Image: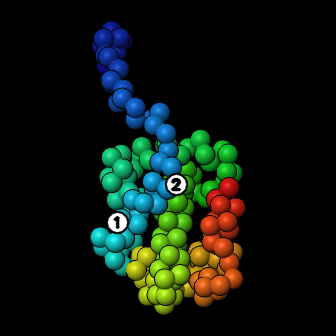
Amino acid sequence: MAPDALARRRPAPARSGSSDRDPLPLPEFEHIVWTLLERRPCVRPSVLDVARSAGRTPRELRRSYEHLSAVLGPLGKGNDMMPRRMLTYACCTYAANLIRRGTKVTAASSLAGFRHNGNFARQFRLYFGCSPRDLRGFCEPEQAARQALS
């Protein structure tokens, strides 16, 4: 391509607000995930589902959390892990709510979109500091979760 042709090219117009949007607050993110889980029980929502429900693209959602990775430290394989981490947390809180209302642990894990009870228990323990069975009387998941996410 000739140099003068490059000079005549105009840059693509920037999408308004695509990269400078604030991240979804955790309560709003949780609300979207819980709504998706109630609409389709036993089907774990994806980051794409959450992004569409929030009126964003998955890339936009991931990029909105990029600055948080610097604050929270390494999150795994790139910044893609932040929305996934929040998605897993929201699914665990959904299951915790079901367990507190008397639902059996295996049913709650399935309704929250976890295919394997062992993985559910591991993730639950990571976020809340206790096993799902211990939830009924011995741990406070909200406080433990805040510490895990901070």
Mark before the other along the chain sequence, 2 or 1: 2
Cα separation between marks 2 and 1: 15 Å
Q: Is residue 135 above or below residue 6?
A: below
Tell me which residue sits at (34%, 59%) in the image: 49
- Where does residue 67 sit, x and y in percent of width and height? 59, 41
Disc 2 residue type (three-letter): Leu
Crowding at dot 2, Cα within 10 Å, few <14 / some 14-19 / many 20+, comes out as few
Quadrant position of residue 36: bottom left
User: For the residue labelled by badge 2, is the local secondary structure a helix, a strand or a loop?
Assistant: helix
Q: Nearer the viewer, residue 66 or 12?
A: 66
- Residue 37, by quadrant, is bottom left
Labelled disc at residue 36 = 1
Residue 50 occupies quadrant: bottom left
Which residue appears at 66% of the width and 44% of the height?
70
Q: Is residue 36 above or below residue 20?
A: below
Nearer-the-camera pick, 103 or 16: 103
Q: Is residue 126 visible?
A: no
Q: Residues within 10 Å of mark 1 (few under 14, many from 20)?
A: some
Q: Is 22 on the left or on the right of 122, as rendered?
A: left
Give me the disc on residue 4: none
**Residue appearing at x 67%, y 51% in the figure:** 72
The label on residue 26 is: 2
Between 94 and 83, the one nearer to me in the picture = 94
Give the image location of residue 93, x and y in percent: 52, 70
Find residue 55 and report its horizontal and vertical position in percent.
33, 46
Judge whether residue 36 can be spotted in this image: yes
Instruction: Give the amino acid at mark 1.
Output: Leu
